[in-house]
Image (spheres, rainbow, N blue to C red):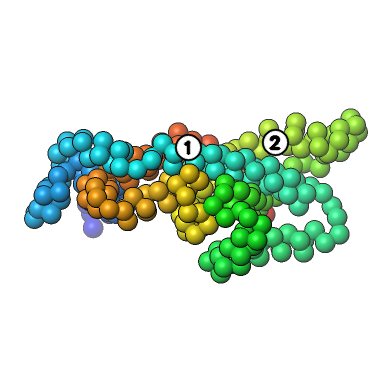
């Protein structure tokens, strides 16, 4: 191989690698984005256009599907229930995760490692295994078909406790000692010093919890029976299973779009904080 051919070969190899990377990225993009795009197209088609072969890949602009979907169910109530449940659940998780994470990451007490391992072991228990006993418990305390049944059982998060514990492990001991010398109580140290420091992690936990609560289906579907307390995902399932206009795929796709849009906007708005929070805990996880 001559001296002039070697640079050309290097350039060709770089171009080939770039082409492979771009092809892989495009394939992943199609796999994840196309289903959402197809729902948008379906929501703007007529029932006759949905079954055309070959299918229409361009939205046709039939916005009346959204009007029909909105008028077919009490969506305002479903949205209000979901924001209320997700908001209180997120607030509760942030408080309990902060307190437990501080205890496991900063405080020194006998049995700390054993208790933390016991908390982590809860992640290995599938939710479906506990549905029947949990249902009986909620029935005994008269919490079925209430907001409490959808908030209190999820007011603590093993994931949130783990992340904040890993973060608090990185708090310098000198900072803790300085707070003790200044006469600061542990409660004040947590809320005035630790919480501002852990804001990226708290943002990550908050976004994760809010999205999980928004997407909750199985638990509220079993534990509730009235639209007055049911969240958006259960409302969407009942909308699809009902009679009349909800059986049309175009109207169902429209309902899927306006029930999914808020959580997509929320993630896009806070995605930088979400990534920053995940990155701030990476050192603690590796350690």
Q: Residue at x 41, y 36 (%)?
A: 76
Residue 141 in view of the camera: yes
Q: Is residue 282 above or below residue 118?
A: above
Residue 13 in view of the camera: no
Inter-mark Cα distance, 1 to 2:
29 Å
Quarter of the rendering containing residue 204: top right
The mark nearer the N terminus, 1 or 2, is 1
Is 209 left, or right, of 96 in this rendering?
A: left
Element assignment for label 2: helix
Q: Residue 169, how many percent across, how many down?
A: 73, 48
Front residue (pair 223, 9)? 223
Report the quarter where the N terminus lies: bottom left
Which is more foreground, mark 1 or mark 2? Answer: 1
Q: Which residue is mark 1?
A: 80
Q: Which residue is mark 2?
A: 195
Q: Residue 170, how many percent across, how many down?
A: 71, 45
Which mark identifies residue 124? none
Q: Residue at x 63, y 50 (%)?
A: 152
């Amino acid at each position: 191989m001559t001296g002039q051919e070697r640079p050309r070969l290097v350039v060709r190899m770089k171009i080939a690698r770039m082409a492979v990377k771009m092809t892989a990225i495009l394939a992943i993009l199609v796999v994840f984005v196309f289903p959402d795009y197809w729902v948008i197209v379906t929501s703007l088609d007529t029932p006759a256009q949905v079954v055309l072969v070959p299918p229409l890949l361009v939205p046709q602009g039939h916005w009346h599907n959204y009007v029909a979907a909105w008028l077919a169910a009490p969506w305002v109530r479903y949205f209000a229930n979901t924001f209320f449940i997700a908001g209180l659940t997120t607030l509760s998780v942030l408080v309990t995760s902060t307190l437990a994470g501080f205890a496991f990451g900063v405080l020194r007490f006998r049995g700390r490692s054993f208790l933390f391992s016991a908390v982590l072991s809860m992640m290995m228990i599938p939710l479906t295994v506990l549905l029947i006993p949990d249902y009986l418990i909620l029935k005994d305390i008269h919490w079925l078909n209430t907001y409490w049944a959808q908030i209190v059982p999820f007011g603590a998060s093993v994931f949130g406790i783990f992340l904040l514990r890993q973060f608090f492990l990185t708090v310098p001991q000198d900072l803790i000692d300085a707070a003790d010398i200044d006469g600061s109580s542990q409660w004040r140290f947590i809320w005035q010093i630790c919480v501002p420091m852990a804001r990226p992690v708290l943002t990550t936990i908050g976004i994760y919890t809010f999205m999980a609560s928004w997407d909750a289906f199985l638990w509220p579907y079993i534990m509730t029976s009235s639209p007055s307390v049911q969240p958006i995902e259960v409302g969407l399932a009942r909308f699809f299973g009902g009679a009349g206009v909800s059986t049309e795929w175009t109207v169902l796709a429209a309902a899927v779009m306006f029930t999914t849009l808020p959580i997509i906007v929320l993630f896009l708005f806070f995605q930088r904080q979400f990534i920053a929070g995940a990155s701030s805990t990476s050192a603690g996880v590796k350690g």
